[in-house]
Image: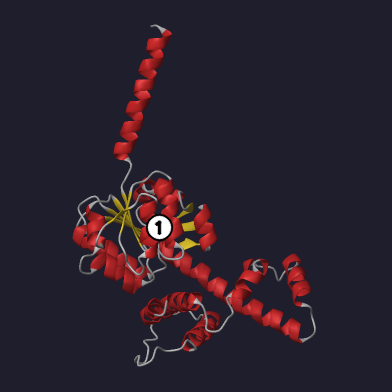
């Protein structure tokens, strides 16, 4: 065969293979373009996936995604209708129930073969209930909460803890890997168990570091020197390594992280009660974070706020 003809056939085959890849690349829906969700969505679309989005809390991030080529639709059900996989990254069980199970929700627009990836920090019980309801429609579900800051989200360096069917997790791994390192944790809901355990340790460590460093400063130690020495010794931790960032969160009124911390500790402590495991340090931390939430000013004429995990999260949404 002549070299030129051989090259032409090789090139034609390459074009056909590219076309086949394009036909088989899943269409992504993304709901929840918040502080971490927006850079996550940008990572996915930057890897060549088509994407549908809808407004949930704010329009600004939707406009940002449209500039990158995302298609805006009217509702979560409309997102599901034109997607193969829908990713949710909303705040809590309550918001997730709204977009996945409520009116004009993902499940209303779902068809057999659709996949749902829940990337929020949620209660394992909620994830399992979504899985049970989705199974009846032939819809696959993964829980895949993340660990890391918005900066890690922007660079695709999040930790992603996946729970659900292993084969489904492997099928969707390429999508998830655009956002970070994927770790399979077990059955549906187990990603949330690992996430909540990690967050529990983090929040306890934050309180321990503040207490120890404050004690040192009040006894005359130089803060910068103390922190640098702690980094070299057994008092070291992620919190100490990132002390300036952590310290910047200790403001009045408390930032959004206080709501999220209170929510996650609430989920964890409810499970601790169910399994009969004492978690005294987590309980003390929960009091601290909820006390921070209580310091937030109420809007004039607003009713007494709901201090449940969902209520705390709703307060954040209304005060943004």
Q: At which x and y percent is residue 99?
A: 28, 66
Name the residue rendered at 56%, 81% in the picture. Answer: 281
Which secondary structure lies at badge 1? helix
**Outermost top residue:** 1
Toward the viewer: 19 or 191?
19
Neighbour class for label 1 at 10 Å: few (<14), some, many (≥20)?
some
Q: Is residue 173 visible?
A: no
Position of 35 relative to 66 (above/below): below
Determine if residue 309 is in view.
yes
Q: Nearer the viewer, residue 194 or 242?
A: 242
Residue 22: image location, x then y, percent = 33, 37
Residue 65 point in image, percent of width and height: 38, 55
User: Where's the N terminus, which quadrant?
Assistant: top left
Task: Quarter of the image for the C terminus: give it.
Answer: bottom left
Q: Is residue 115 left or right of residue 209?
A: left
- What residue is disc 1 on? 64
Quadrant assignment, res 31: bottom left
The image shows a total of numbered marks equal to: 1
- Given residues 144 and 14, the one toward you in this image is 14
Residue 197: x, y in percent? 50, 69
Residue 184 placement: quadrant: bottom left
Direction from residue 111 to residue 115 in the image, left or right: right
Q: How is the image coloured?
A: secondary structure
Q: Which residue is found at the position 70% from the left and 79% from the top?
A: 213
Instruction: Name the foreground residue: 244 vs 100.
Output: 244
Residue 151 placement, left or right of 32: right
């Amino acid at each position: 065969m002549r070299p030129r003809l051989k090259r032409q056939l090789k090139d034609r085959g390459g074009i056909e293979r590219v076309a086949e890849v394009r036909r088989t690349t899943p269409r992504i829906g993304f709901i929840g373009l918040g502080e971490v969700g927006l850079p996550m969505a940008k990572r996915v679309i930057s890897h060549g996936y088509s994407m549908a989005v809808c407004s949930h809390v704010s329009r600004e991030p939707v406009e940002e995604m449209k500039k990158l080529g995302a298609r805006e639709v009217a509702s979560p059900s409309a997102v599901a209708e034109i997607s193969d996989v829908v990713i949710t990254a909303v705040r809590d069980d309550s918001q997730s129930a709204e977009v996945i199970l409520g009116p004009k929700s993902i499940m209303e627009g779902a068809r057999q073969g659709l996949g749902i990836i829940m990337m929020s920090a949620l209660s394992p019980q909620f994830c399992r209930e979504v899985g049970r309801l989705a199974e009846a429609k032939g819809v696959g579900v993964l829980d895949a909460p993340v660990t890391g800051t918005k900066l890690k989200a922007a660079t695709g360096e999040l930790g992603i803890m996946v729970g659900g069917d292993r084969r489904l997790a492997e099928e969707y791994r390429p999508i998830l890997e655009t956002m970070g390192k994927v770790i399979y944790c077990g059955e549906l809901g187990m990603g949330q168990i690992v996430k909540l355990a990690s967050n529990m340790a983090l929040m306890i460590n934050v309180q321990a570091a503040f207490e120890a460093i404050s004690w040192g400063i009040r006894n005359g130690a130089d803060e910068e020197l103390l922190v640098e020495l702690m980094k070299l010794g057994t008092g070291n931790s992620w919190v100490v390594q990132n002390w300036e960032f952590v310290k910047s969160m200790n403001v009045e009124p408390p930032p959004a992280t206080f709501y999220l911390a209170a929510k996650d500790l609430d989920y964890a402590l409810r499970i601790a009660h169910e399994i009969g495991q004492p978690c005294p340090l987590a309980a003390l931390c929960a009091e601290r974070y909820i006390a921070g939430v209580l310091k937030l000013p109420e809007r004039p004429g607003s009713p007494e706020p709901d201090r449940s995990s969902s209520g705390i999260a709703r307060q954040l949404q209304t005060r943004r």
